[in-house]
Image (cartoon, rainbow, N blue to C red):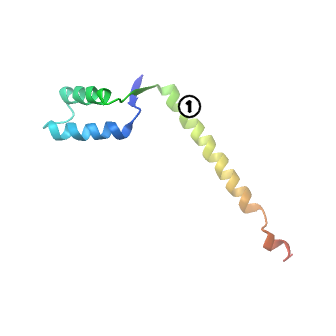
Amino acid sequence: MASKPANPRLWNTIVAMAKAKYSNYPNPGASHWVHKNYVEKGGQFIETSEKDRRKKMEQKKQENKAQKERITKKEDKPSKKDKGKK
Protein backbone atom coordinates (compact mmCIF):
# COMPACT_ATOMS: atom_id res chain seq x y z
CA MET A 1 0.00 0.00 0.00
CA ALA A 2 1.08 3.52 -0.68
CA SER A 3 0.13 6.84 0.80
CA LYS A 4 -0.46 10.00 -1.12
CA PRO A 5 -0.86 13.51 0.25
CA ALA A 6 -4.45 14.67 0.66
CA ASN A 7 -3.41 18.27 0.01
CA PRO A 8 -1.14 18.26 -3.09
CA ARG A 9 -0.76 22.04 -3.09
CA LEU A 10 0.70 22.08 0.44
CA TRP A 11 2.86 19.06 -0.38
CA ASN A 12 4.32 20.73 -3.50
CA THR A 13 5.02 23.93 -1.55
CA ILE A 14 6.95 22.03 1.10
CA VAL A 15 8.84 20.02 -1.53
CA ALA A 16 9.89 23.29 -3.18
CA MET A 17 11.12 24.54 0.20
CA ALA A 18 13.10 21.32 0.67
CA LYS A 19 14.71 21.67 -2.76
CA ALA A 20 15.85 25.16 -1.80
CA LYS A 21 17.11 24.01 1.61
CA TYR A 22 18.94 20.81 0.59
CA SER A 23 21.67 20.72 -2.04
CA ASN A 24 20.62 17.35 -3.39
CA TYR A 25 16.99 16.35 -3.32
CA PRO A 26 15.64 13.72 -2.86
CA ASN A 27 17.63 12.15 -0.07
CA PRO A 28 16.49 10.45 3.14
CA GLY A 29 17.04 13.51 5.32
CA ALA A 30 15.18 15.83 2.97
CA SER A 31 12.32 13.36 2.56
CA HIS A 32 11.96 13.08 6.32
CA TRP A 33 11.99 16.87 6.62
CA VAL A 34 9.23 17.18 3.97
CA HIS A 35 7.07 14.55 5.65
CA LYS A 36 7.52 16.07 9.11
CA ASN A 37 6.73 19.62 7.96
CA TYR A 38 3.74 18.50 5.91
CA VAL A 39 2.20 16.79 8.95
CA GLU A 40 3.05 19.75 11.23
CA LYS A 41 1.22 22.12 8.88
CA GLY A 42 -1.91 19.96 9.03
CA GLY A 43 -1.32 17.73 6.03
CA GLN A 44 -2.74 14.23 5.99
CA PHE A 45 -2.17 11.17 3.85
CA ILE A 46 -4.64 9.00 1.98
CA GLU A 47 -4.01 5.26 1.92
CA THR A 48 -4.20 3.83 -1.59
CA SER A 49 -3.88 0.36 -2.99
CA GLU A 50 -3.59 -1.08 -6.47
CA LYS A 51 -7.15 -2.41 -6.20
CA ASP A 52 -8.53 1.05 -5.35
CA ARG A 53 -6.57 2.66 -8.17
CA ARG A 54 -7.89 0.17 -10.74
CA LYS A 55 -11.44 0.61 -9.45
CA LYS A 56 -11.23 4.39 -9.86
CA MET A 57 -9.81 4.01 -13.37
CA GLU A 58 -12.68 1.71 -14.34
CA GLN A 59 -15.24 4.19 -12.96
CA LYS A 60 -13.64 6.98 -14.96
CA LYS A 61 -13.78 4.90 -18.15
CA GLN A 62 -17.47 4.20 -17.61
CA GLU A 63 -18.20 7.88 -16.97
CA ASN A 64 -16.36 8.89 -20.15
CA LYS A 65 -18.23 6.26 -22.16
CA ALA A 66 -21.60 7.46 -20.79
CA GLN A 67 -20.70 11.06 -21.58
CA LYS A 68 -19.75 10.18 -25.18
CA GLU A 69 -23.06 8.33 -25.59
CA ARG A 70 -25.00 11.38 -24.35
CA ILE A 71 -23.15 13.61 -26.80
CA THR A 72 -23.83 11.32 -29.76
CA LYS A 73 -27.53 11.07 -28.82
CA LYS A 74 -27.78 14.88 -28.81
CA GLU A 75 -26.17 15.03 -32.26
CA ASP A 76 -28.55 12.39 -33.66
CA LYS A 77 -31.70 14.30 -32.63
CA PRO A 78 -33.01 16.61 -35.35
CA SER A 79 -33.19 20.22 -34.31
CA LYS A 80 -36.43 22.22 -34.32
CA LYS A 81 -35.21 24.08 -37.41
CA ASP A 82 -34.78 20.83 -39.36
CA LYS A 83 -38.35 19.54 -38.67
CA GLY A 84 -40.07 22.00 -41.02
CA LYS A 85 -37.67 21.44 -43.94
CA LYS A 86 -38.70 17.83 -44.71
Q: Position of residue 41 (x, y in %)?
A: 31, 30
Q: Position of residue 3 (x, y in %)?
A: 39, 26
Q: Amino acid at mark 1?
A: Lys
Residue at point 24% right, 29% down?
A: 31
Residue at point 36% right, 41% down?
A: 9
Q: On the picture, is 47 further left or further right than 57?
A: left
In this view, 19 is above or below 78 = above
Q: Position of residue 65 (x, y in %)?
A: 64, 46
Dot 1 alpha-carbon crowd within 10 angstroms: few under 14, some 14 to 19, many 20 or more: few
Farthest residue, direction front: 41
Q: On the picture, is 2 further left or further right than 30?
A: right
Farthest residue, direction bottom: 85
Q: Nearer the viewer, residue 19 or 44?
A: 44
Q: Nearer the viewer, residue 74 or 6?
A: 6
Q: Nearer the viewer, residue 4 or 65?
A: 4
Q: Nearer the viewer, residue 36 or 53?
A: 36
> Which quadrant of the view contains residue 10?
top left
Number of marks present in the image shown: 1
Residue underneath mark 1: 55
Callout 1 secondary element: helix
Farthest residue, direction top: 1
Farthest residue, direction left: 23
Q: On the picture, is 84 further left or further right than 20?
A: right
Q: On the picture, is 41 further left or further right than 73?
A: left
> Which quadrant of the view contains residue 42?
top left
In this view, 18 is above or below 32 = below
Q: Quadrant of the C terminus?
A: bottom right
Residue at point 15% right, 36% down?
A: 22
Q: Quadrant of the N terminus?
A: top left
